[in-house]
Amino acid sequence: MTMFIKKTKEDIEHDEIINLLGEREETDRLDFKQKWKLFYSLSEEGKQKINKKERDELIKDILGLVNGNSHIVKKNKYLIVGADDKAFGDDGSRVLYDVDYRVPTASEITQWVNGACTPSVVGIEADFLTIKEKKYLCG
């Protein structure tokens, strides 16, 4: 007897991210960031300003993934925020951190990246994912 489990696009992406978190090393199509502190508060009213140095580092990381080796041109690339790039827990799983601060939208990221390169990069996505009760940004 064969049994099929219907999975949504979100389920498949969730499973893919879980698998990627198990990778021991970063690759041409995978990058981990512990945190992204791109915004900081300017006043009690909560107005925020972009940390340009951090933003430029983000653009560099994304363009590095986009311009990867030719053998991965048509494959999805992932930048996972909230996952340590080197540290693993006692159980062997990657050390994870909660992304409980403001992060840029996919639209903001696309605008920044495309303002820094030609031709434009298409297909940038950014989604939150909760694993082990922690919230991560995957793009």
Image: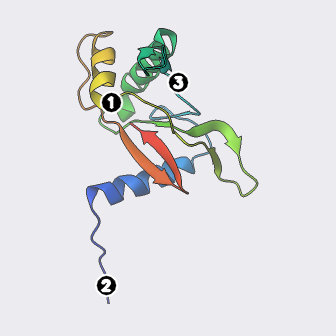
Q: What residue do we see at 31% from left, 82% from top?
A: 3
Q: Is residue 74 above or below residue 15?
A: above
In this rendering, the count of numbered labels is: 3
Q: Residues within 10 Å of mark 2 (few under 14, many from 20)?
A: few
Residue 37 circle label: 3
Look at mark 1 in the image and give the residue it sits on.
105
Q: Nearer the viewer, mark 3 or mark 2?
A: 3
Q: Looking at the rendering, which quadrant does residue 32 occupy?
A: top right
Horizontal arrangement in the rendering, residue 39 relative to residue 6 (left or right)? right
Horizontal arrangement in the rendering, residue 100 relative to residue 68 (left or right)? right
Q: Looking at the rendering, which quadrant does residue 139 occupy?
A: top left
Tell me the amino acid under the disc marked 3. Lys
Spatial CA span between label 1 and label 3: 14 Å
Q: Earlier in the sequence, mark 1 or mark 3?
A: 3
Q: What residue do we see at 48% from left, 19% from top?
A: 44
Q: What residue do we see at 23% from left, 27% from top?
A: 122
Tell me the amino acid under the disc marked 1. Thr
Q: Is disc 3 placed on a helix, strand or loop?
A: loop
Look at mark 2 in the image and give the residue it sits on.
2
Q: Is residue 2 above or below residue 79?
A: below
Q: Nearer the viewer, mark 1 or mark 2?
A: 1
* Outermost residue, right side: 90
